[in-house]
Amino acid sequence: MKNIPTQSSTHGDAAHTSAGYRAHAAVRRGVARLALAGGFACMAFGALPAQAAPADTMIKAVKFDDVKEVQKQLSQGMDPNMTDDQGMPLLVLAAREKSDQVGQALVDNPKTNVEIVDKAGENAMMLAALNGDMDFVKLLIAKGAEVNKKGWTPLHYAAANGHDDIVTLLIRYSAYIDAGSPNGTTPLMMAARGGHVSTAKLLLDAGADINVKNQIGLNALDFAKQYKEPDTVKGLTARMEQMQKKQAGSAPAAQ
């Protein structure tokens, strides 16, 4: 048999119902406050993209060598040393993308640090040398950028890709011919690794040490052999034999 509600239980239900309305109203007020707060938060966060837009615009302009946009952003106070979301400074990015006009605009700004490096320790001259961008390398040198640095250098990078014209330019500006990377690898070793015979000859003619070894005991000839560059192996072997004969000929005769 069904239970029949009593008056007291009915009053109790009414009370619960009244309490329920009050609770529901409170919840609605709370939700409204949260919604309002959320609205303010959205408004606040909604302003962020507008603040980030100039930086995004600048980075895009650098990548596409849009010098007018870069000059505009710089005139409005944009930091010429800012980085992209990967930590790459604008000048280094310009060198990577061969954006020569933007590079000029950046180095013309007195606030630009021409030696600034990315997270990998690479500066603009290194990437310009790697890309064979002679104009960018000359631009940086004209603005006083150093051709030498600790560890990997622009000469390593130019030699790695066989850019003889840039190798010649860097040597002319006193690049250290046997610069050692963190593990002692030299520009000559990088040229040998890439099979760049003319670059190896250029470095040797400029005084590179063919016998120097890196920290794991490899010299330039070892690099050429390891990376299966027969023409470079032949050239380096001939140069070593030539040096040995010269040394033997200059040695004092036995009494």
Image (spheres, rainbow, N blue to C red):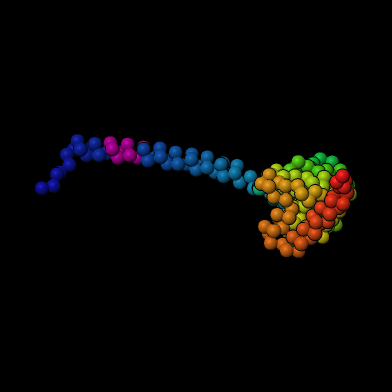
59 or 187, nearer to the observer: 187
73 or 152, nearer to the observer: 152
When asked about the image quadrant of residue 113, the answer is: top right
Residue at 70 percent of width and 54 percent of height? 222
Residue at 72 percent of width and 45 percent of height? 184
Residue 21 on the magenta span: yes
Q: Is residue 172 visible?
A: yes
Q: Is residue 96 visible?
A: no
128 or 246, nearer to the observer: 246
| Residue 212 picture location, percent across and down | 75, 47
Residue lying furthest left:
1
- Find the magenta span and give its range: 15-22
| Residue 88 picture location, percent across and down | 70, 47
When asked about the image quadrant of residue 41, the answer is: top right
Residue lying furthest bottom:
231
Residue 119 on the magenta span: no
183 or 41, nearer to the observer: 183
The quarter of the picture where the C terminus appears is top right
| Residue 246 picture location, percent across and down | 86, 52
